[in-house]
Image: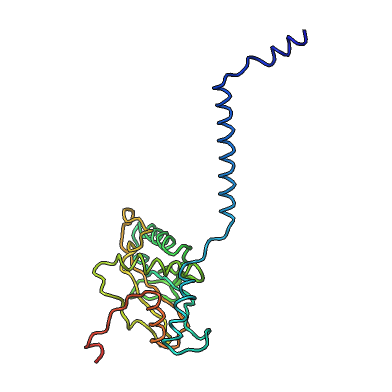
Amino acid sequence: MAEEKEKKSKGPKPTDAEIAARKAAKRAKVETEVEVDDKKSAASEPAPPARLIAHYREKVVPALQEKLGMKNLMATPRLEKIVISMGLGKIATSGGADSKAKFEQAEKELSIIAGQKPVRCKAKKSVANYKVREGQETGLKVTLRGSRMYEFLDRVVTLAIPRVKDFRGLDPNGFDKNGNYNFGFTEQTVFPEVDGASVTFQQGMNITMVTTAQSPDHGRELLKQFGFPFREKSKLEER
């Protein structure tokens, strides 16, 4: 009687097709677990450094030492930070029903471009002629440093500048006395990260490259080594 009960509990013998299906299911489960473990390990690993960091150390620094005649390695100019700013005074003072939505959209687009959330800038004092009140939010600003700064610089040189319409080169006279450079874009769609179909209004931005250069010539040479396409001076400008 006990033997008959054991036979009934075991049930019929599985076919070859069922055995193959069970093995395939087990194999697929193991492969899925391995893929999940690989993804977790990849996510835990730090991101690779920006390629312009290695470019600066291996190529830019030796070239600057040779051209500028600097013997000390630490004396060569370098980038300290990049500041991206958007002036939204017209939108803030328009008083329309969609002014708040436009301000939030510009904030979202700037965060996509920079890779970090921007800071809202407020007016320091009231100006009646421009309909600006003290404390009113009139702009956005992002400050980039480290790897994120070099990644943004890489995208500006390789992607954004070539997408500018009728581009004739950057102004070589945009440096201040400390070697910092200012330039801008008239529209945010030059960055491929921004979806052109979702853009409802064109918004420009100003970009400031803050360097440790001691003169405009040193700052210009630093940015040239990074691939900045400066416009050549004409004969009238040289005079």
115 or 107: which is nearer to us?
Answer: 115
Residue drawn at x 33%, y 61% is: 189
At which x and y percent is residue 222? 41, 80
Q: Which residue lies furthest to the top in this view?
A: 1
Residue 118 rendering spot, x and y as whole percentages: 46, 65
In which quadrant will I find the N terminus? top right
Q: In the image, is residue 88 above or below residue 7?
A: below
Q: In the depicted view, which residue is nearer to us: 154 or 190?
A: 154
Q: Which residue is drawn at 34% across and 53% down?
A: 198
| Residue 74 to residue 207: above or below | below
Task: Classify the position of the C terminus by image quarter.
Answer: bottom left
State the residue at coordinates (40%, 77%): 225
Q: Left or right: where does residue 45 sit relative to residue 101?
A: right
Q: What colour scheme governs how the chains and residues are painted in the rendered image of this protein? A: rainbow
Q: Is residue 16 above or below residue 169?
A: above
- Outermost residue, front side: 16
